Amino acid sequence: QVQLVESGGGLVQTGGSLTLSCAASGSIFSISVMRWYRQAPRKQREWVAGITTGSLETYADSVKGRFTISRDNAKNTVYLQMNSLKPEDTAVYYCNLKYGLFDDYWGQGTQVTVSS
């Protein structure tokens, strides 16, 4: 069983920065793909960024060049560095761990609010 705990959300002004963290329990973190998603009010959850076991990074077009995903396998933690934040980045951010066909876990989410 895996538990994911996000932290680092908060209120920031337009143009500001935040770094989200997601700490995972269990033993499969280093062999799992990690992703960040977000869900804004009245919108569907959307994928933001992903990082493979080999640290290959991918990003949604809406955040490319502003967000950076990284992982520290020694700490079982994945990060999302968010720069140049915009009001449209306001959402609850969730981390996701996926391994194989059946291991698919979600954190409880952390709120990010960007004021204009």
Image (spheres, grey):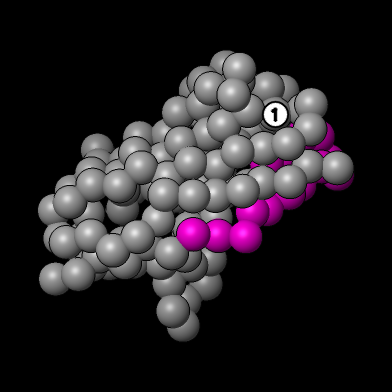
The picture quadrant where one finds residue 90 is bottom left
Residue 47, can we see it? Answer: no
Percent from the top left, x then y, of residue 17? 23, 47
Percent from the top left, x then y, of residue 68? 35, 35
Q: For the residue labelled by badge 1, is the local secondary structure a helix, a strand or a loop?
A: helix
Q: Where does the N terminus fall, quadrant-wise?
A: top right
The picture quadrant where one finds residue 91 is bottom left
> Is 5 positioned to the left or the right of 82 in the image?
right
> Is 23 positioned to the left or the right of 58 in the image?
right
Q: Where does the C terminus fall, quadrant-wise?
A: bottom left
Residue type highlighted by circle 1: Phe
Q: Residue at coordinates 45% horizontally, 28% vertically from top-left?
A: 70
Residue 103 vs residue 28, the one in the foreground: 28
Q: Residue at coordinates 53% horizontally, 22% vertically from top-left?
A: 72
Residue 25 vs residue 57, the one in the foreground: 25
> Is 5 positioned to the left or the right of 61 in the image?
right
Percent from the top left, x then y, of residue 103? 82, 42
Percent from the top left, x then y, of residue 112? 37, 62
Find the magenta span and give its range.
Answer: 97-110
Q: Which residue is mark 1?
A: 29
